[in-house]
Image (cartoon, rainbow, N blue to C red):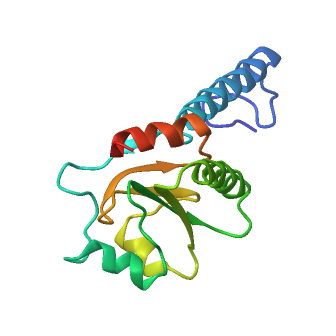
Amino acid sequence: MAAVGGGELGKEVPVLVRVLLVAAVVVVALALGLWWRSRQGVVRVAAPDGAAPVASEPDDVWRERGVELARSATFVQFSTDHCSPCRATSRVLGELVARRDDVSHSEMDIDRNLDLVRRFSVLRAPTVLVLDRDGREVARMTGAVGRAQAEQALAVVGA
């Protein structure tokens, strides 16, 4: 019985082709992994006019949710209970806030704050919004956040 292209049905693929195929898949997976890792915790500065759309009084949006805005900057972390990078990010931000009285950190559960998730285009957990003292987003970080990235975010705010 002939297969499409004139070969026999059930004919085995040569070993070299299999090896090359596996090698190509490994290279693509490695490239995607490195790209993904490079985006973890990166500080992205918001648009100069104040990033995501908020109410005319941005601090009211946060006050309604129990977020106390600090004098210099506030980290608002969107997380889920089952997210391991969320716990690590929370620990890093908590340690930073413990050393500074002009910075605060609040966590928002993604499942219980879907309106804010949509409003601020939160696409993954954790996402940390960096707010100025008026409650406007000035930067954001997604993925696991390290101490260096958190301090870089504070530099964006000028804190």
Q: Position of residue 5 (x, y in %)?
A: 60, 30
- Label tally: 0
Task: Please state which of residues 132 and 89 is positioned toward the viewer in this rendering.
Answer: 132
* Image position of 154 (left or right of 138): right
Q: Is residue 26 above or below residue 154?
A: above
Residue in the picture at 41% in, 85% down: 64
Q: Quadrant of residue 72?
A: bottom left
Q: Is residue 40 above or below residue 18?
A: below
Task: Please state which of residues 77 and 157 is positioned toward the viewer in this rendering.
Answer: 157
* Image position of 100 (left or right of 102): right
Residue found at the very far front of the displayed protein = 101
Q: Is residue 101 above or below residue 114?
A: above
Residue in the picture at 77% in, 14% down: 16
Q: Position of residue 155 (x, y in %)?
A: 39, 38
Q: Position of residue 102 (x, y in %)?
A: 46, 55
Quadrant of image for the N terminus: top right
Quadrant of image for the C terminus: top left
Q: Position of residue 112 (x, y in %)?
A: 56, 82
Q: Quadrant of residue 117?
A: bottom left
Residue in the picture at 47% in, 74% down: 67
Residue in the picture at 77% in, 37% down: 9
